[in-house]
Amino acid sequence: MKIVLLDSITFGNTDLSCFDALGEVENFAATEPSLTQARVQDAEVIVTNKVVITREHMQKSKNLKLICVAATGTNNVDLESAREFGIEVKNVAGYSTDSVVQHTFSMLFYLIGHSRYYDEAVKSKKYSRSSIFTDVSHPFFEIKGKKWGIIGLGEIGRGVANVAQAFGAEVSYYSTSGVNRNEAFARTTLEDLLRESDIVTIHAPLNDKTMNMLDYEKLASCKDGAVVLNLGRGGIINEAAVAKLVDEKDIRFGLDVFAKEPLPEDSPLLQVKNSERLYLTPHIAWTSVEAREKLIASVCQNIKESL
């Protein structure tokens, strides 16, 4: 069986030897769109993280039986064509929950604790020249007693909710599907959640209901001093609106995902004046060592089950 890995660079230094036990492996670190067809032409199994697999790719790949998406989302595969051609598509769910939950709090602590400022205050020797033993110029707040609103209460959202509650936060949520119900936490409207929350975290999928869901008007309704973190999908939050609000209002934003990745050099997010209110990370929330190991093991298991 010929197995083709199209973008293994996204797995870092994770051990990929489990694929070798399953067949003949062709491993490409990255694949440009112009090269995809040639690389999958004779494949029986395709493993892709972000490389797009189209109807034409499937139509011309006569041996193709299985497409393994090394991710939770399958939006990079033409699922309708796969069904038509009898090609199985398998993804991996739940592998990165703990990693994303942890990064959510990492981003929050960085922003509310003014980590950039205080680190530089010591390293620049500003603190060494101070007349007092402490620096209280950038106040931070405690999570305990604060209102924490979660947009998208799936597995990751519930994980964040449980940790936030352990810190003493008052948790509420908005269901983007309209059907998700969880008796452990208060369900509310999007408008009320944005208006009342001190901390807002986004853990929703990107679909017709969530695309550009948080535009300028909605984000501007957040209270002064609020923190908004997006660890869902980039298209959910309007990036131009974020860039504008960072310079207009005392709202802090943390974004790990973007509408276009990598983030373009001319992105408005890279032009803001009040950069201390904005924390950007390059889509890393899912990438803990443990999460990537679990992901690869699950992909190999998906292939075994389809043999």
Image (tube, helix red, strand yellow):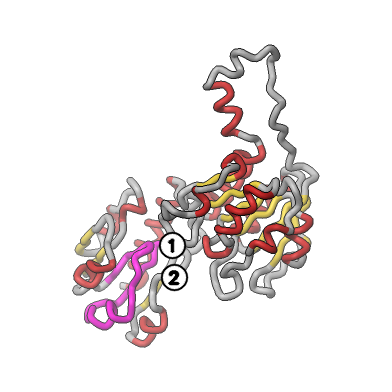
Does 190 sit left or right of 232 as displayed?
Answer: right
**Foreground pick, 91 / 240:** 240
**Foreground pick, 2 / 106:** 106
Does 116 sit left or right of 260 as displayed?
Answer: right
Q: Secondary structure at mark 1?
A: loop
Residue identified by numbered label 1: 71
Q: Which mark is residue 74?
A: 2
The residue under the point 77% across, 65% down is: 188
Residue 58 at what x, y percent from top left? Answer: 29, 79
Which quadrant would the N terminus be assigned to in this image? bottom left
Q: In this picture, which residue range is highlighted in magenta? A: 45-71
CB under 8 Å between discs 1 and 2 = yes
Q: Secondary structure at mark 2?
A: loop
Q: Which image quadrant for residue 23?
A: bottom left
- 46 drawn magenta: yes
Q: Which image quadrant for residue 213?
A: bottom right
- 202 drawn magenta: no
Q: CA distance from mark 1 to mark 2?
A: 7 Å
Residue 140 at what x, y percent from top left? Answer: 71, 35
Q: Amino acid at mark 1?
A: Ala
Which quadrant would the C terminus be assigned to in this image? bottom left
The residue under the point 58% across, 62% down is: 238
